[in-house]
Amino acid sequence: MQADAVAAALAQAHRSEWAFVLSATVRVAGDLDVAEECAQEAYVSALQAWTRDGVPERPGAWLTTAARNQALDRLRREVTLRRKLPLLVEPATVDPHDPADLDWPDAAVPDDRLRLVFTCCHPTLAPEARVALTLRLVCGVPTPDVARAFLVSEPTMAARITRAKKKISEARIPYRVPGRAELPERLDSVLTAVHLLFSTGHTAGEGDALVREELCDRALHLARTLAALLPEQAETRGLLGLLLLTDARRATRTDEQGRLLLLADQDRTRWDQRAILEGLTVTAGALASGPPGRFTLQAAIAGVHAMAPSLEQTDWPRVVHLYDRLLAVWNTPVVALNRAAAVAFADGPAAALPLLDELATDPRLADYPYLPATRADLLRRLGDAAGAAQSYRRAMKLTANAAERAFLEQRLAEVSRAAGAEPAPG
Amino acid sequence: MAKYAILIYEDPAFYANISPEAWPAVVDAHSKFVEQVFALGGSLAGGEALAPPTTATTIKGGGTVTDGPFVETKEALNGIYVVEARDLDHAVEIAKLCPAPAPGGGVEVRPVVDPTTNPF
């Protein structure tokens, strides 16, 4: 078997089967760390075995069997050496005494990864730890990328993940899908995890690949599964709508050279109309289901953009209005920054600058590259080339994304030329 | 089943100033809690109320003996239960019913270490 073909099959199996392999191995290993190691060893042993024997018909089943056998071997070897409490694996997800659970059989959960997702998102874990664990364990996202998604350093994130894993085993957080009665309150952190997974794929923080399609696809798959499992929870459909409407722009976010394209410069004729149609339909359904939550409102904003023929012809007052409603249910500095960018289109860049001044005092945005990048864009539009150049340099210093840095460099060169042609103001 | 400690943190002033009429209600609340632990499928492995921190004596490394609690806080450890529960979900379900009537009070759930394992 050709090494290239085996490597490609392995990469594909990692993308599509990692969570399946890991979540099945956790049951045997009784320990998240051990299960992770066994799953990794299974992928390593697959390289040799598949090169020798060919890629198996069902790579996921092959890898799961290999990982579970690794776990069993370890259990036999280490039975006297075990120093950690085993993870509490609950086979039953149904409480036979709870009437609400009677129509909620285990078979209704088609995706075993959900058990892992709900354990990772347990309410007794810190909110940041829940999402981080989901990204790390369910999706196999590398710790540095998880750190970037949360705007914290890599050692901080590594410590956070280790601490959370320790609490799961020592405090005996059960490895199970919650019963229907507890599901709604557990849902928000799960949806957040799936959304951040998508964002990590959509704008990979580091490296040259701006779009990590497999992460986006996995997030979409999880969002679809959640929407199918909990259709009465409108936010599951809100999240699915948001991901579909954002993902519809995937092909147009960069040019042929991989450089970032802003909404203004994207070729709207290449947006995925099928994804937009499905996204709008799903979002409309969520909006009609009662007071919208934060995912539904974000989907509604994405829907306004998806329907606009151009940046100029976008219904910006409606976008600002939706951001106002979003801030009311989800008051974060990043939402406030996005609202300010919308205000710049609705009422002009000068109206948005004071909003950015206010946000600049928020320590949570101190290292956030989109704050100086937004300021640079506003100053550029106002003709302040020198001020724009300064903000572009600041943004370049903060971003680790090659495509974003290339974009900022290009804009910096443009405003620097403009500043050279005319005397700098002040 | 695993053991969990339920640590009750409350402002000791609440009990120092409590009226004689209000006291039986506190005792009743704890009796009721003990019944509820069993009703929820858990069991009680121990529990004591502690005298206020003003009665505490602290001995730090080196053997220096001082008057008062180890750490001065508004809410102090005033009592402890040890319960047996299936998992953390079960322990939290039980702990939510544990009385801590003083304003600003609450309880903390901590797994009890199984001596054959290393939680650190």
Image: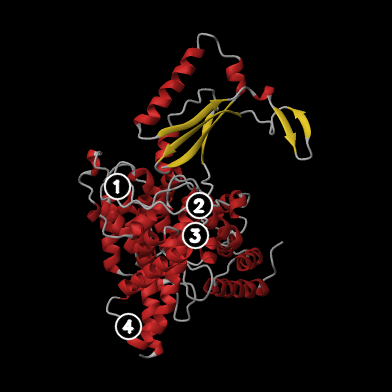
B76 relative to A133, above or below: above
Q: Is A348 displayed left or right of A242 in the figure?
A: right
User: Chain ID for label 4?
Assistant: A
> What amino acid type should be assigned to the residue bearing mark 1?
Gln
The residue carrying mark 4 is A55
Residue B21 in percent (x, y) is at 50, 8
Mark 1 and mark 2 lie on one chain; the one further toward the N terminus is 2
Kindly state the secondary structure of the residue where label 4 is placed: loop
Residue A248, numbered circle: none
Residue B22 in percent (x, y) is at 50, 12
Q: Which mark lies nearer to you, 1 or 2?
A: 2
Kindly state the secondary structure of the residue where label 2 is placed: helix
Mark 1 and mark 4 lie on one chain; the one further toward the N terminus is 4
Kindly state the secondary structure of the residue where label 1 is placed: loop
Tell me the CA gap for discs 1 and 4: 41 Å
Kindly state the secondary structure of the residue where label 3 is placed: loop
The residue carrying mark 2 is A128
The residue lying at 47 percent from left, 75 percent from top is A209
Mark 4 and mark 2 lie on one chain; the one further toward the N terminus is 4
Looking at the picture, tell me which residue is in the foreground, A367 or B120.
Answer: B120
The residue carrying mark 1 is A233
Residue A319 in percent (x, y) is at 40, 53
Q: Which mark lies nearer to you, 1 or 3?
A: 3
